[in-house]
Image (cartoon, rainbow, N blue to C red):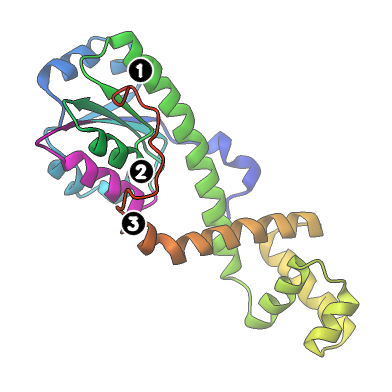
């Protein structure tokens, strides 16, 4: 089982994905130092990226750069696919004559930033560095919550009941009274949870439980979130392309 303290030290190599970009943009990127510093994959189109056999294995810190035009909205589809599979990849969208509605849709679909073309290479590099930092943080957070959720699955139904009471802040005696079980039984089940989770204190136990509950709630709401494309009631984000 992965310990939380080892998550940062076990980060995989950052990946750069250039998806559906014009040849001039790809060429400009390849001429930067980052082209050799990071592993770069080039995909001619969004379809090629989504249909890649390794698409769902691209769960690592990385930055994806794609292009959105007034006529070609495949970038929006890509963003929604990444969000649906809870990818840690941070996406930068280059907008070429895109409408304000498309820009807002891109941001709401998960784009970290929307940049209007043409863009200077140094500016794009700065956005890229920012995207990598965000992606690393997202990757670590999601790895931790997924690990916590896996730990939650190790518990029996009776242990889950005790854990829920601990999460509410109840004492062992109060838990025994609520569940109508003996005080010693409560103590044994709490100890069993700690052993299964590899934690030593109640504070650690509650921390893992909070992250597990967060992952569980996200899983339950994922379908509704992924299908929500309405713009009504949304405030317009500040983006380079919308200014």
**Quadrant for the N terminus in the image:** bottom right
Start and end of the magenta stretch?
67-86
Label 1 crowding class (10 Å Cα cut-off): few <14, some 14-19, many 20+? few
**Residue under label 1:** 37
Front tag of 1 and 2: 2
**Residue under label 3:** 226
Classify mark 3: helix, strand or loop.
helix
Q: Which mark is residue 108?
A: 2
214 and 240: which is toward the camera: 240
What residue appears at the point 84 percent right and 75 percent down from the top-left corner?
A: 187
Front tag of 1 and 3: 3
> Which of the 4 quarters of the picture holds residue 168?
bottom right
Label 2 crowding class (10 Å Cα cut-off): few <14, some 14-19, many 20+? many
- Report the side of 99 relative to 33 (left or right): left
Which x, y percent locates residue 232? 34, 50
Q: Is residue 160 above or below residue 180?
A: above
Residue 81 sits inside the magenta stretch:
yes
The answer to whether one can see residue 110 in this image is no
What residue appears at the point 67 percent right and 62 percent down from the top-left corner?
A: 197
Query: Which numbered disc, 3 or 2, marks the residue that appears first in the sequence?
Result: 2
């Amino acid at each position: 089982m992965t310990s939380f303290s080892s998550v940062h030290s076990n980060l995989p190599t950052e990946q750069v994905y250039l998806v559906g970009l014009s040849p001039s943009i790809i060429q400009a990127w390849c001429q930067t130092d980052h082209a050799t510093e990071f592993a770069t994959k080039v995909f001619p189109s969004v379809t090629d990226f989504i249909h890649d056999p390794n698409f769902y294995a691209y769960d690592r810190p990385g930055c994806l750069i794609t292009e959105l035009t007034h006529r070609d909205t495949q970038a929006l589809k890509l963003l929604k696919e990444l969000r649906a599979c809870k990818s840690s990849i941070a996406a930068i969208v280059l907008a070429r004559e895109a409408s304000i509605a498309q820009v807002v849709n891109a941001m709401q679909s998960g784009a970290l930033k929307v940049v209007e073309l043409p863009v200077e290479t140094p500016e794009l590099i700065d956005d890229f560095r920012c995207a990598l930092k965000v992606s690393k943080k997202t990757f670590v957070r999601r790895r931790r919550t997924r690990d916590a959720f896996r730990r939650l699955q190790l518990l029996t139904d009776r242990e889950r009941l005790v854990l829920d009471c601990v999460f509410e802040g109840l004492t062992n005696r109060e838990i025994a009274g609520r569940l109508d079980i003996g005080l010693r039984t409560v103590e044994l089940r709490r100890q069993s949870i700690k052993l299964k989770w590899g934690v030593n204190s109640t504070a650690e136990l509650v921390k893992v439980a909070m992250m597990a509950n967060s992952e569980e709630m996200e899983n339950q709401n994922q379908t509704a979130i992924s299908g929500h494309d309405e713009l009504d009631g949304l405030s317009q984000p500040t983006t380079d392309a919308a200014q």
